[in-house]
Image: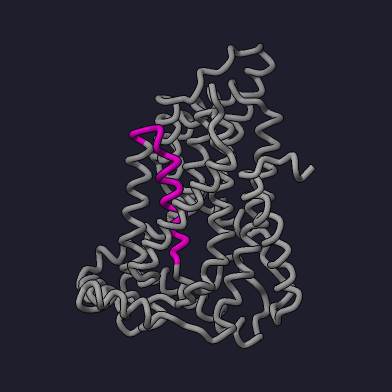
């Protein structure tokens, strides 16, 4: 059976099998606690979907997909299918309206249009295939998040920290460490810091909106490439941290980012959470493993995934511009908030390019 699998596809299967087994072994053999937040990834996506302006953004994404659909789809097969599609579209819109306590009036106005566009998409959707795809995606994301978190949790247990090397590289390029120049500039611009505090945490919003765009376009193979790319990025990223373990500017030199106390309180609270979890894991005193909740900066997985999502928007100019906003905002945010050095950002983009190359070899576009 293994020989019958095309060689490029094995590039995806090997890490998909080996790394979860390695993570489970590390979890069992280390001082990490057994308790793990298995549902956290889904919770973060759920919080994004019911956040302010998400429905309005979803309307834009569905319109962009409708303007450039991958294939026209088959004719509607009958009243039963129409009824099921309408019921599902209305159920989704109603569920969002009832669950969200943060939607703006614009979101509520957008929901009927979202339901109408979703109905059109569902008319052309294979329900069984879509349900299987959703279930498989949930399973893959949960497992990948676990693997990534376990690897990330052990990064500093060896006592190696290479921030000085990254800082020396910035000094060689710019005459002084770039993170110091960014911090000095940002400390007098609270509006930019506040914007960064908001933009940085749009990460899961962008993941969900890109998935919605690809679903509405109707190209199932492209959807699988998207899931595979996100997953492989986490798997390879979690391992690549060990090539250059580093804290990041806000953790390595926190005094220079004192302005976060006033202008980015949410970021500061998350950074403190990550610092506490990382220190507890290194000391063998962690009581519960929270998904993603550990320090690591090189490469930037945030920018790696943002670069992937920008790539998957390439078929639509409106969606590309929309994704470029997230991408550019994230570059500003990771530097202003002290999450990353410039080399981390570049490393994340290189990782994204590597992942795209591997996935396209393993899942090439179908020939007409």
**Residue found at x 67% / y 54%:** 14
Taking the image as shown, residue 22 lies to the left or right of residue 270, namely: right
Q: Position of residue 357 (x, y in %)?
A: 49, 47
Q: Nearer the viewer, residue 2 or 85?
A: 2
Q: Position of residue 325 (x, y in %)?
A: 33, 48
The secondary structure making up most of the magenta span is: helix
**Residue found at x 40% / y 82%:** 252
Relative height, residue 116 to residue 338 (above, below):
above
Q: Per the image, is 108 magenta?
A: no
**Residue found at x 29% / y 77%:** 259
Relative height, residue 316 to residue 311 (above, below):
above
Q: Position of residue 196 (x, y in %)?
A: 33, 62
Taking the image as shown, residue 333 lies to the left or right of residue 205, namely: left
Q: Per the image, is 304 magenta?
A: yes
Range of magenta residues: 299-318
Relative height, residue 122 to residue 305 (above, below):
above
User: Looking at the image, can residue 201 be seen?
Assistant: no
Taking the image as shown, residue 6 lies to the left or right of residue 229, namely: right
**Residue found at x 22% / y 79%:** 176
Q: Nearer the viewer, residue 301 or 271?
A: 301
Residue 158 figure quarter: bottom right
Q: Position of residue 211 (x, y in %)?
A: 52, 41
């Amino acid at each position: 059976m293994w020989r019958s699998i095309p060689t490029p596809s094995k590039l995806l299967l090997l890490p998909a099998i080996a790394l979860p087994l390695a993570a489970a072994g590390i979890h069992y053999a280390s001082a990490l606690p057994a308790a793990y937040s298995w549902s956290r990834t889904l919770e973060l996506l759920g919080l994004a979907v019911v956040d302010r302006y998400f429905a309005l953004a979803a309307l834009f994404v569905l319109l962009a997909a409708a303007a450039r659909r991958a294939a026209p789809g088959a004719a509607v097969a009958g009243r039963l299918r129409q009824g099921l599609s309408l019921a599902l579209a209305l159920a989704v819109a109603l569920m969002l309206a009832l669950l969200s306590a943060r939607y703006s009036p614009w979101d509520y106005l957008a929901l009927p249009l979202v339901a109408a566009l979703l109905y059109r998409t569902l008319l052309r959707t294979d329900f069984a295939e879509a349900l299987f795809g959703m279930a498989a995606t949930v399973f893959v994301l949960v497992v990948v998040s676990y693997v990534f978190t376990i690897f990330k949790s052990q990064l500093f247990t060896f006592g190696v920290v290479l921030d000085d090397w990254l800082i020396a590289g910035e000094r060689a390029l710019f005459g002084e460490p770039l993170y110091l120049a960014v911090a000095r500039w940002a400390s007098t611009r609270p509006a930019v810091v506040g914007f960064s505090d908001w933009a940085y945490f749009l990460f899961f919003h962008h993941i969900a909106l890109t998935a919605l765009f690809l679903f509405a376009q109707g190209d199932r193979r492209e959807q699988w490439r998207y899931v595979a790319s996100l997953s492989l990025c986490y798997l390879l990223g979690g391992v690549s941290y060990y090539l250059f373990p580093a804290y990041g500017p806000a953790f390595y030199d926190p005094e220079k980012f004192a302005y976060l106390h006033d202008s980015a309180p949410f970021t500061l609270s998350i950074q403190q959470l990550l610092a506490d979890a990382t220190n507890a894991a290194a000391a063998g005193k962690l009581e519960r493993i929270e998904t993603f909740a550990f320090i690591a900066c090189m490469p930037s997985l945030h920018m790696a995934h943002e670069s992937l999502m920008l790539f998957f928007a390439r078929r639509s100019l409106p969606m590309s511009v929309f994704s470029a906003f997230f991408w550019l905002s994230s570059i500003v945010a990771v530097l202003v908030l002290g999450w990353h050095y410039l080399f981390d950002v570049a490393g994340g983009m290189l990782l994204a390019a590597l992942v795209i190359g591997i996935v396209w070899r393993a899942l090439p576009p179908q020939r007409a």
